[in-house]
Image (cartoon, coloured by chain):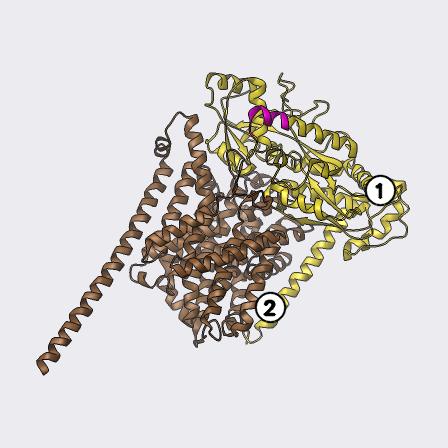
């Protein structure tokens, strides 16, 4: 393996590779930062350029595009509450509040450095643990996916703040939005109203953009402020951010590993891992928990580390099993087959040079991404000072363009606007749109895997619950789901009782004041 | 100081991206032209070839006056090729391979437009309803995937089977029954016997909702009289993961996994139509084993319903040259999309697809899987 690494390093440290890395990172960050153009679109857009390149360089370019797209996607998430990629959805929860408090630059640097940590962890796990992780990911069957998704949905409990009921309603609505479309088992179409665009269901990209971009733009207009947020640039901001991050070392490592592991599960995706990381960050940050949702630094660091770890993780099934586990990995798969290379463990025998160059390329992207990021934070944060009368149309146009460019479909634009209005109204009623977004992301996973579990249990003459409990990993996820739900409920009870306690204290004080006033008379 | 000039650095990086893109594009075109020139039919195409290398680099339509080719028609501007699926997938890869070998033969560029949605229906609808009929808009059609939705849900699909003007079929991908490498079923009959003893107890992974593999499973049950249970997944890769992970006992999928997953899963039988000089000679066909089960997926070139007849002829000629190019054939095999044994032109393609439609309608009726 070490000779392979040397080969790989030789492959990566050539002028052409570095050129490709730079180009890929710049392009990926730019495309990822545009709302509506997801990480997969970024990778797919650059795929044709790789056909003329050496396979290893083509792969490195795609990997660097993917990595930096995950980074770039979080920039608008933080600045204007509009994730550029679905992996950045969770970053909006605390990133945007940080911007509103004038801490946009701190948030952007935090996001960059967290991404560096997560991306490095992901790349290292990819390099050293691919065979084990790949074998492990094969153990994920319908039962495991179902309970993983349920655990993800249970995290709504921690996201919803005080009103769990509204959060659950929101999540339920999100799941319901995944119902229109073709049924998995029978192939019959549900709620398509004979509209062929709905056969595939409501697409996630326009829906997420609607929730975030459109809904928050309406909110901005409503506020009537001059600009998105104040910007109070702090001297020595980088050093300040690094110092505060020093206290989050364990969290960053934990969420980076978490992101990589979830990324290695075929079909899970960056948004799922970001939400999982957010929920975990909130759970383990005992001191700062009440700040989550209002601009807690951990709420940005966790998901950002995770969504960059996903990059390394999603390449694990590609190299370890020969199966693409995510949309971007599927594009990389295509990049290999077009050159006549069969992706998978056999690459380590036939074309080890490409395999190692690829893996080391993923690692090499990180420092380049750091450089590109450092250059962009300064001027991208100025966006929040721009007058709203320019920002609003710009954001809306970007959202519409991004949605249309997804698959040149005006129906999607309609979805964008409709979902945007729904999201705005939901927020008015106190239902956090993030809960609905979570339901939307997880809905198909939950339904399809429940259906598959029922079928598979039937072939083994088992009842459904019997089937679930016959699989140790599934049992593990069931426990996680129960745990997450319970700890979320506990948090809420604690917050309520803290409120009651402080209310009681206020009453005591008032009582004391009143009695002292009386005694003075 | 670095920060003050950060905007310029960004501009520099973007410029480098574009420069790299330009280099990458040219390399690809040169390779393709070389391959094409060697093998393409001599007499007709020689004059047109000279214009090509320039045309590739700029990507502009080159109105070469030397176009005295056999037919009367020739594209005069870049041609749109709709691929109603995501880049990197099977259909996309097949079409790009075809494009690579076709471009050196024509005076313009082929631009792929990926228009994914509703299992391909979105892209096909757009091509049929809005595609220009002057021969500058073609698409890849992948029967049965473009006919199945129409059979299942006629109201929802806004095109008819006859709306596709088939030009040629350049890839023939039969369905394959796979089991894990270490499975107890050595041969197809082992599997069938086991299914007889355990009705509904054997599970078969299939990709997609009521798609081609599901039909294949119904055909298997119909022909052998045994009952197996289908477990639908979202795609070939997910089915493979399920098979290898032990969730299902077998899987129906297309041929690409024979090579891609060699050593992890193995094919029991292949549903090809003809056993004469087959691709994958080591895999027995259902026919050879005594079961009349045939299901082939096609990679076909198609145009809108009103497309000019001269254009159809032109593209059919180009297609023939591509299909007979040995390098192309090998490239298609490498991606798991074997080419047909002999060239299948417009009339035969249409006939094959219509036969397929009636076969599908029969199965759907028999098993009552009609949509609402």
Q: Chain of mark 2?
A: B
Residue drawn 72% across and 39% down?
A: B163
Closer-to-camera residue (A415/A40): A415
The residue that label 2 is drawn on is: B10
Residue drawn 68% across and 50% down?
A: B113
- The mark lying in front, picked from 2 and 1, is 1
Residue A364 visible from this viewpoint: no
Residue B206 visible from this viewpoint: yes
Residue B310's label in the rendered image is: 1
Residue drawn 34% across and 57% down?
A: A282
Q: Residues in magenta?
A: B361-369
Q: Position of residue A265 (x, y in %)?
A: 46, 44
Image quarter of residue B337: top right
Check disc 1 and report its element: helix, strand or loop.
helix
Q: Which chain is brown?
A: A
Q: Which chain is yellow?
A: B
Counting residues from the N terminus, which is met first, the one under dot 2 or under dot 1? 2
């Amino acid at each position: 393996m070490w000779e392979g690494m040397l080969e790989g390093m030789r492959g990566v440290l050539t002028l052409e590779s570095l050129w490709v890395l730079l180009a890929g990172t710049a392009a990926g960050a730019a495309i990822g930062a545009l709302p509506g153009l997801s990480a997969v679109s970024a990778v797919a857009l650059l795929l044709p350029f790789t056909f003329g390149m050496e396979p290893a360089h083509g792969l490195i370019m795609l990997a660097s595009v993917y990595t930096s797209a995950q980074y770039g996607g979080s920039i608008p998430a933080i600045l204007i509450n509009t994730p550029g990629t679905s992996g950045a959805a969770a970053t909006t929860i605390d990133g945007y509040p940080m911007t509103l408090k004038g801490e946009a630059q701190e948030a952007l640097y935090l996001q960059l450095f967290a991404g560096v940590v997560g991306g490095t962890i992901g790349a290292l796990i990819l390099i050293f643990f691919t065979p084990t992780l790949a074998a492990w990911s094969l153990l994920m069957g319908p039962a495991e996916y179902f309970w993983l998704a349920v655990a993800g949905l249970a995290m709504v409990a921690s996201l919803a703040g005080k009103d769990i009921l509204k959060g659950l309603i929101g999540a339920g609505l999100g799941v319901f939005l995944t119902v229109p479309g073709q049924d998995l088992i029978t192939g019959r179409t549900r709620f398509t109203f004979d509209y062929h665009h709905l056969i595939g269901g409501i697409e996630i990209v326009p829906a997420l953009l609607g929730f975030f971009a459109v809904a928050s733009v309406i909110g901005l207009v409503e506020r009537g402020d001059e600009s998105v947020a104040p910007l109070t640039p702090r001297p020595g901001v980088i050093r300040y951010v690094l110092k505060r991050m020093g206290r989050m070392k364990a969290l960053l490592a934990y969420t980076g590993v978490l992101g990589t592991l979830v990324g290695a599960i075929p079909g899970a995706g960056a948004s799922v891992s970001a939400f999982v990381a957010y929920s975990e960050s909130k759970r383990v940050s005992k001191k700062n928990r009440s700040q989550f949702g209002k601009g807690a630094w951990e709420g940005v660091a966790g998901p950002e580390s995770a969504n960059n770890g996903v990059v390394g993780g999603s390449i694990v099934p590609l190299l370890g099993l020969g199966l693409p586990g995510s949309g971007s990995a599927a594009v990389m798969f295509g990049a290999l087959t077009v050159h006549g290379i069969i992706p998978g463990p056999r690459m380590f025998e036939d074309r080890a040079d490409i395999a190692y160059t690829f893996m080391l390329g993923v690692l090499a992207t990180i420092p380049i991404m750091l450089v590109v990021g450092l250059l962009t934070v300064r001027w991208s944060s100025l966006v929040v000072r721009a007058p709203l009368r320019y920002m609003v149309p710009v954001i809306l146009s970007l959202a519409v363009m991004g949605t249309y460019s997804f698959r040149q479909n005006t129906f999607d634009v309609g979805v964008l606007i409709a979902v945007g209005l729904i999201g705005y109204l939901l927020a008015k009623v106190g239902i956090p749109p993030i809960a609905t977004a979570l339901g939307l992301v997880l809905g198909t996973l939950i339904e399809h895997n429940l259906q598959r579990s029922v079928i598979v249990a039937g072939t083994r003459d088992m009842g459904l619950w019997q089937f679930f409990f016959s699989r140790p990993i599934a049992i593990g996820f069931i426990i996680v789901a129960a745990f997450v739900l319970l700890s979320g409920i506990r948090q809420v009870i604690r917050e309520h009782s803290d409120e009651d306690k402080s209310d009681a204290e206020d009453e005591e004080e008032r009582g004391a004041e009143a009695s002292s006033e009386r005694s003075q008379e | 100081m670095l920060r003050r000039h950060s905007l310029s650095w960004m501009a520099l990086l973007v410029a480098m991206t574009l420069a790299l893109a330009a280099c990458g594009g040219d390399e690809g075109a040169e390779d393709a032209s070389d391959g094409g020139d060697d093998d393409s039919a001599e007499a007709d195409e020689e004059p047109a070839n000279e214009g090509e290398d320039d045309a590739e680099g700029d990507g502009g339509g080159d109105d070469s006056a030397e176009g005295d080719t056999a037919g009367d028609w020739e594209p005069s501007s870049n041609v749109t090729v709709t691929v109603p699926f995501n880049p990197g997938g099977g259909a996309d890869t097949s079409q790009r391979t075809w494009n690579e070998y076709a471009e050196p033969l024509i005076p313009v560029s082929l631009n792929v437009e990926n228009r994914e949605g509703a299992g391909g229906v979105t892209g096909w609808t757009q091509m049929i309803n809005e595609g220009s009929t002057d021969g500058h808009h073609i698409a890849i059609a992948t029967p049965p995937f473009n006919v199945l939705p129409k059979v299942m849900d006629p109201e929802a699909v806004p095109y008819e089977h006859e709306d596709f003007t088939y030009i040629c079929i350049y890839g023939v991908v039969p369905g394959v029954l796979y089991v894990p490498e270490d499975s107890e079923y050595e041969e197809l009959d082992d599997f069938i016997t086991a299914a007889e003893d355990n009705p509904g107890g054997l599970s078969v992974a299939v990709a997609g909702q009521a798609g081609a593999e599901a039909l294949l499973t119904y055909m298997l049950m119909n022909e052998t009289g045994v009952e197996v249970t289908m477990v639908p997944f979202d795609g070939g890769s997910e089915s493979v993961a399920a098979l290898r992970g032990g969730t299902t006992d077998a899987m129906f999928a297309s041929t690409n996994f024979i090579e891609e997953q060699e050593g992890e899963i193995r094919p029991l039988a292949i549903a090809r139509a003809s056993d004469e000089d087959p691709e994958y000679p080591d895999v027995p066909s259902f026919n050879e084993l005594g079961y009349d089960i045939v299901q082939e997926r096609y990679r076909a070139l198609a145009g809108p319903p009103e497309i000019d007849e001269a254009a159809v002829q032109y593209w059919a000629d180009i297609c023939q040259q591509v299909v007979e190019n040995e390098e192309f054939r090998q490239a298609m095999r490498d991606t798991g999309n074997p080419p047909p044994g002999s060239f299948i032109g417009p009339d035969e393609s249409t006939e094959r697809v219509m036969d397929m439609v009636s076969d599908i309608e029969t199965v759907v009726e028999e098993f009552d899987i009609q949509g609402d």
